Image (cartoon, rainbow, N blue to C red):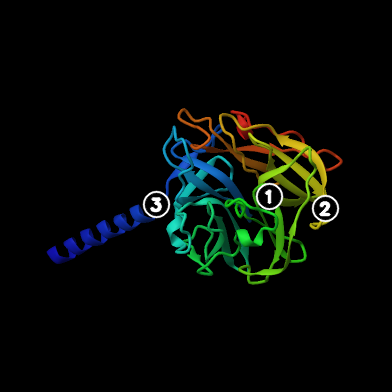
Amino acid sequence: MRKTFFTTILLAVTALAGCAQSAKPVYQADSNPIFRHKYTCDPAAMVEGNTLWLFTGQDVAGNQTGYHLTDWCAFSTTDMVNWTEHPTPLKSTDFKWNVTNDAWAAHVTERNGKYYYYISTSGAGIGVAVSDRPEGPYKDALGKPLLTKEDCEGADHGWVCIDPAVFIDDDGQAYIFWGNRYCYYAKLKENMIEIEGEITKLEFDERWPFTEAAWVHKANGKYYLTYACTWPEKIAYAMADSIHGPWEFKGLLSECAGNCNTTHPSIVELNGKTYFFTHNGTLPEGTSYSRSVCVEEVVYNPDGTMQKCDVTTDGIWK
């Protein structure tokens, strides 16, 4: 009897401990920035079914005077209000070749039941990690960079090979876009961890020059290339009938981010609405180096162009 009692207590305590370990923080969003308990940046959204996954970089505590990012964050939501934060999916140290120890902008996509995490560094190149689950954990798929500065024709600065963005077209062909000052793209092989064929450098309208942070999405039969332009950065975009262009530049989607020199677009559709994610520096101790992810709803005009989408405090919750 006594042995049974203590066995029951032990099982109960063990079960509670397991629940505590598996429990994940849940946050409610009602204004921009979405998250206020930490500094998040460089958003990359992915939609699976009725769930939106949001992967971000993480700036360290506020009032910073430089970029200090060593890991990435993962969040998910089904209603854009209640957000679940998952354990850290990936760290800069998970890539042994990453001598910079920096965790710069990244992008996650799914293919054939696997999830591929394309990451960038401040000079060591672009890498890719893989997992069986969107929340990870992820493991370096190559043990070396997928792309480096040597793959960036015409560039002579060390941080050109950053900001990967992957787009899988309707025919199943995957493409990766990346770059700083210059924008490049190439096909990815079916395995998603090798480049196939030539690398192409895109040409931009001089009124809307490319700075960084390319993002590609498709809507209503049109391709959209959204990116950060000028400095301090604004967000511009172009449209095309083919992923290979020609691209018609349409102007600005969003003005300069509040209290922040950089910006970083991500556009996806969830439950019939299109959402535009970016970051700014508007938390109380926010700066260009202590950023926070925000979201607004995208509205398309009858001709397919997007209406101006500046970030507001009320955001999508107004």
| Amino acid type for the residue under numbered disc 1 | Trp
Residue on which disc 1 sits: 215
N-terminal of the pair, mark 2 or mark 1, is 1
Drawn side of residue 72 relative to residue 208, left or right: left
As helix, strand or loop, the secondary structure at mark 3 comes to: loop
Decide: few, some or many residues near mark 3? Use Cα within 10 Å; few <14, some 14-19, many ≥20: few
Q: How far is the residue under mark 2 from the one under mark 3? A: 41 Å
Q: Between residues 153 and 94, which one lies in front from this camera angle? A: 153
Drawn side of residue 118 relative to residue 9, left or right: right
**Where is residue 83 shown, x and y percent of the image?**
51, 44
Decide: few, some or many residues near mark 2? Use Cα within 10 Å; few <14, some 14-19, many ≥20: few
CB contact under 8 Å: marks 2 and 3: no
Question: Would you identify the image quadrant in which residue 171 lies?
Answer: bottom right
Quadrant placement of the N terminus: bottom left
* Residue 270, visible in the rendered structure: no
CB contact under 8 Å: marks 2 and 1: no
* Residue 134, visible in the rendered structure: yes
In the rendered view, tell whether residue 112 sits above or below residue 70: below
Residue on which disc 2 sits: 221
Residue at point 18% right, 65% down? 4
Q: How far is the residue under mark 2 from the one under mark 1? A: 17 Å
Q: Between residues 134 and 123, which one lies in front from this camera angle? A: 123
- All told, the count of numbered labels is 3
N-terminal of the pair, mark 1 or mark 3, is 3
